Amino acid sequence: MARITNPRQRTTILYQVMELNYLYSKALDLIPLTTEEGLFLYEKAPLEELMFTGDLLRQVHNPGMNAGWMIDRNVNITNICFSQCTFCNFCRKKGSPDAFTTPISDYIKKIDELFALGGDQLLLQGGMNPDLGLEFYTELFSRLKELYPALKLHALGPPEIVYLAKKERISYSEVLQRLIAAGLDSLPGAGAEILSDRVRKKVSPAKATSEEWIEVMKVAHTINLPTSATMMYGHIETIGERIEHLVKIRELQDEKPHGHYGFITFIPWPFQDEGTVLAEKYGIRSSYNSSDYIRLIAVSRIMLNNIKNLQSSLLTVGKEVAMLSLHAGANDLGSIMIEENVVSAAGAHYRFGAEEIQGIIREAGFTPVRRNQKYEFLDK
Ligand code: SF4
């Protein structure tokens, strides 16, 4: 390796190393890093150092070598959506020949399959269909719980709550309380994308603003509804906006009442561009690459000093990257997700069965542990 002889260059490098070491030490003491510090780490830190720090922090939050996974099933309530986000290749306009709203008979078939495979949770997502109001959802949830009392419903997301509150002219709290009374068990962090209105105006202009997303989550945390936080990145956002997103999630988690669930996990996944308006019309391709994903996982673990679980998106990044993520701060590979239609409609084609996901975790040097949505271990 060539020696650096330029004194100014040497001083700059020395300061950078000192600054990085200071930030690693601050992170390991679980002291929150500022946006500027997070950005500095993301842009300047060597990947192996970030991974090392992320892994140490993973062990602080989740001692040992367990890595979680679960069995659940995605059912899409409807693909009709007025939002027409430019990254979405799943939604259809009302009246489209392939528009659908899932009939109850399909739920029954799918839930029977889910239980036969040992799972008990439905992830219910879909579009914001202007014909479906709060009553549709409460009746659907009640019916499903009546038929399957042991079923868990991880359903909708902040944009749907905002939409339903506006449609019914009631508060977020009332929407959530009525959904909970009907059978909602937990609220996915769907629709966060990047919590920056500059970005949202371009990728999801008709959807909840970042303030609205945050407000719904605040209410969910106050009434102690378990939630998750997500990030869909790699489209038009800057690295700074990724870090700001993490800081907003952390600050929101800090505000949750003591002892409440808050965000149980954080799950980042890359934009899937296949057939999307962003790619086809605006030429914006996914900026995903494996080392950047690992970097994001490590920086997320470092920035989110108050969220215990960090899930790597096996479904979108595949086996090798998911395995590496477990050595960079992630402690979970998510679900085998029996059916998934939203990200797979835009190019995520990875599929894994129960044996495979456990094999991947073992191959990475961890012990697979099946868990539920609250990240409680079920068996080993
Ligand atoms: S991402 Fe969700 S809200 Fe946006 S268009 Fe697709 S289904 Fe609708």
Image (cartoon, grey):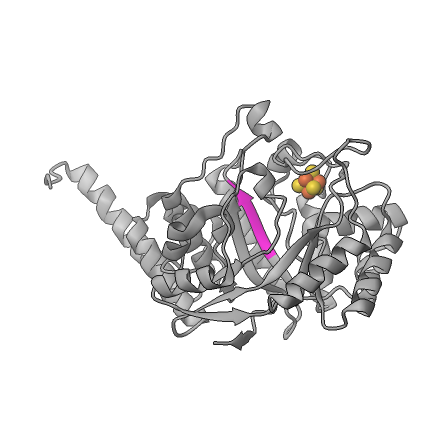
State which region is magenta. 229-233
Q: Position of residue 253 (x, y in %)?
A: 60, 62
Quick check: 122 left or right of 55? right
Looking at this view, is 130 or 97 the one in front? 97
Looking at this view, is 74 or 276 the one in front? 74
Identify the residue at horizontal 81%, vertical 55% (top origin): 104
Looking at this view, is 8 or 180 the one in front? 180
Quick check: 62 left or right of 83? left
Q: Is residue 104 magenta?
A: no
| Number of on-image labels | 0
Q: Say if 134 sits above or below 78 in the image.
A: below
Q: Position of residue 197 (x, y in %)?
A: 64, 38
**Ligand 1 placement by image quarter:** top right
Prevalent SS, magenta region: strand
Q: Say if 239 sits above or below 320 in the image.
A: above
Q: Position of residue 88 (x, y in %)?
A: 63, 36
Residue 313 visible to an observer of this rendering? no
Quarter of the image for the N terminus: give it.
Answer: top left
Residue 275 visible to an observer of this rendering? yes
On the image, which quarter does residue 86 sit in?
A: top right
Q: Position of residue 225 (x, y in %)?
A: 71, 66
